[in-house]
Image: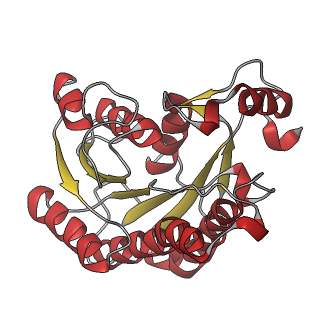
């Protein structure tokens, strides 16, 4: 129960990796706020709040467009109103493009960067505003913790997804900048960089060609699962990671080592 009574907000928490993070946080004792633009999971199945209730946990859902500052502001304000604090902010929401540089249109660039860069900026900023008003919980060193979801494609090229790769590079840099700027005020900021994760969604990400490419890049004999990422996020969100900040933890089956 590493997150016993902690309050955790997860953006993009309705589906895939975000849903897995919410469920894992619940299993570790957290009270969870699921923030997303939709409540039903893209891969099907029970919605996140109902799944948490089945585990005996406490959660609430908020419809939030993270590209809108007022909605992010309300997300944090209502979280504190309901649960009394914000201990962990997980900035998981992201958007994909589908084009190399010369084929990337301005609307595609704006859409992906609005979610992946501006949305993460808003999430980090509003979380820190709140966390700086809080004293650390008994026995803890940190006022609050931020975990950003980056990607291996924030460090190497994202084939045919130029805007997405740039947005994830922003996540890596943002994490390090925030960690350095606010460590002396008790704020911890880390990132988790998933490799190829099979979340159950359909589309171009799971074509035979895409899967073959991912297997060729991944030394581990299987591709990733949402739960693999969730476990890493919970570690960084907990007091077990008491002297780790500014890190970009690879959860990629050795992709970046290959």
Residue 141 visible to the viewer: yes
Foreground pick, 9 / 12:
12
Q: Which quadrant, please, contains the N terminus?
A: top left
Q: Residue at x 73, y 33 (%)?
A: 210
Kindly give the residue lying farthest to the left in the view shown.
82
Residue 176, quarter of the rendered image:
bottom right
Kindly give the residue lying farthest to the top in the view shown.
221
Examine the rendered structure and indicate whether residue 172 appears above or below residue 25: below
Q: Which quadrant, please, contains the C terminus?
A: top right
Residue 142 visible to the viewer: no
Examine the rendered structure and indicate whether residue 92 appears above or below residue 76: above
Residue 109, quarter of the rendered image:
bottom right
Residue 130 relative to residue 162: left or right: left
In the rendered image, residue 54, in percent from the top left (x then y), is placed at 18, 22
In the rendered image, residue 36, in percent from the top left (x then y), is placed at 30, 53
Foreground pick, 213 / 179:
213
Foreground pick, 102 / 179:
102
Examine the rendered structure and indicate whether residue 121 appears above or below residue 235: below
Examine the rendered structure and indicate whether residue 1 appears above or below residue 65: above
In the rendered image, residue 191, in percent from the top left (x then y), is placed at 58, 56
Residue 160 relative to residue 21: left or right: right
Residue 147 relative to residue 52: left or right: right
Q: Residue at x 34, y 27 (%)?
A: 44
Question: What colour scheme governs how the chains and residues are painted in the rendered image of this protein?
Answer: secondary structure
In the rendered image, residue 106, in percent from the top left (x then y), is placed at 60, 77
């Amino acid at each position: 129960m590493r997150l016993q009574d902690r309050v955790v907000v997860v953006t993009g928490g309705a589906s895939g990796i975000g849903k897995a993070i919410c469920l894992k946080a619940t299993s570790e004792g957290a009270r969870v706020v699921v923030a997303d633009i939709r409540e039903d999971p893209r891969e099907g199945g029970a919605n996140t709040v109902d799944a948490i209730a089945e585990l005996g946990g406490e959660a609430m859902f908020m419809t939030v467009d993270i590209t809108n500052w007022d909605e992010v502001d309300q997300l944090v304000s209502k979280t504190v109103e309901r649960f009394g604090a914000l201990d962990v902010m997980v900035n998981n929401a992201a958007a994909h493009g589908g084009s190399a540089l010369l084929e990337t249109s301005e609307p595609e660039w704006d859409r992906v960067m609005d979610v992946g860069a501006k949305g993460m900026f808003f999430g980090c900023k509003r979380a820190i505003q709140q966390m700086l008003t809080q004293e650390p919980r008994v026995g803890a060193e940190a006022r609050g913790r931020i975990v950003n979801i980056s990607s291996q494609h924030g460090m190497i090229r994202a084939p045919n997804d130029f805007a997405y790769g740039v947005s994830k590079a922003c996540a890596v840099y943002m994490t390090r900048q925030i960690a350095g700027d606010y460590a002396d005020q008790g704020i911890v900021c880390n990132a988790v960089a998933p490799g190829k994760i099979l979340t159950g969604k359909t589309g171009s990400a799971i074509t035979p060609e895409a899967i073959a490419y991912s297997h060729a890049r991944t030394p581990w004999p299987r591709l990733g699962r949402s739960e693999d990422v969730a476990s890493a996020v919970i570690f960084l969100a907990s007091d077990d990671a008491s002297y780790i900040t500014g890190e970009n933890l690879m959860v990629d089956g050795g992709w970046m080592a290959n």
